[in-house]
Every structure is written in C-alpha cells, then in structure tokens.
Amino acid sequence: MFSHIMVGANNLEVSKKFYDAILGTLGAKPGYVDGKGRVFWTTPTGTFSITKPISGAATPANGGTIGFACETPEQADAWHAAGIGAGGSACENPPGERPGSGMYLAYLRDPDGNKLCALHKLPG
C-alpha cells in the first residue's frame, strides 16, 4: 500500500545514526544522502527517509506511530536496544507480547520525538 515514509529531522547526522542502527537490525543498509541532504533507506518492501523540513522545526505527529515489521521477537528486541543505544528513548510498555493481541511490540521515540513501533505477529 505504501511506497515510502518520510519524517522531519532537526539534526540529520544524529537521526541518520539512530535510523542506521534500528533499520540495520531489520537488514537495511546504511542510509544514503541525496543531493538535497535527505537520507533514504531502501528495501524491497519500501523506502524510509528523513529530511529537514522546508519551513520550521521538525515536530512529531500527535497520535502518529510508524510501525516496522519484525520477523521474530528477538529482532524486535534488537531493534529496541539499537534505538536506545543510538539516542532514542523508550516509550509505552517494555518490549513484549501484548496479552490477547497476538503481537510482540517494542516502542521507541526517535531523537525528534517521532513514535516508532517494532511489531512481530505471533503464530496462531
């Protein structure tokens, strides 16, 4: 359904380090910088990117969450740990299975406050 997601970043160097870390746990290569200074991570399933806003400061979406698919709970845990280690902050509950949901979730905020989620659908 989606071709790409782009979010604003106030410090592209800090945000690139953060996203290189978390997206690397999902198999993405380090992001590349285009001629306009935007950073892109491209995979067979889509593209994630960051940019300095054209006007004003980057702010997180109120009520927005960007979800990343994980193949295993361990991959979601690695994603979460990489994000904390690269300047992100934990939010919501600790990583784990959400009772009755059939999902294993891990939540972070990136350096600009965007809310992110690693999601693994549990079998059954």
Image (tube, rainbow, N blue to C red):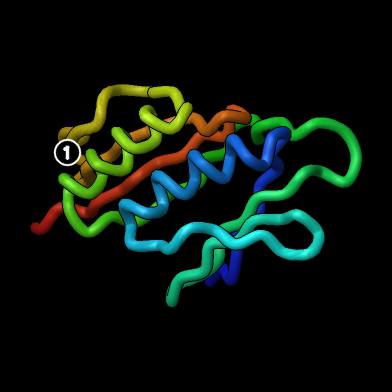
Q: Nearer the viewer, residue 80 or 24?
A: 24
What residue appears at the point 55 percent right and 66 percent down from the top-left corner? 47
Badge 1 element = loop
**Amino acid on which the number 1 mark rests in the picture:** Gly
Residue 33 in the image: x percent, y percent?
66, 59
Q: Nearer the viewer, residue 67 or 56?
A: 56
Up the image or down, 51 lies above or below 123; here it is above
Up the image or down, 113 lies above or below 2; here it is above
For residue 63, side relative to residue 33 (left or right): left
Up the image or down, 68 lies above or below 93; here it is below
Residue 95 in the image: x percent, y percent?
24, 31
> Where does label 1 land, which residue?
100
The single residue placed furthest to the bottom in the displayed view is: 44
Residue 1 in the image: x percent, y percent?
53, 71
For residue 64, side relative to residue 93 (left or right): right
Residue 26 in the image: x percent, y percent?
33, 57
The single residue placed furthest to the left in the displayed view is: 124
What residue appears at the point 40 percent right and 41 percent down from the top-left corner? 117
Q: In which quadrant will I find the C terminus?
A: bottom left
What residue appears at the point 72 percent right and 34 percent down from the top-left corner? 10
Splitting the image into 4 quarters, where does residue 62 fall? top right
Splitting the image into 4 quarters, where does residue 6 fall? bottom right
Other residues around mark 1 within 10 Å, as few (<14) / some (14–19) / many (≥20): few
What residue appears at the point 54 percent right and 58 percent down from the top-left corner? 31
Splitting the image into 4 quarters, where does residue 44 fall? bottom left
Q: How many marks?
A: 1
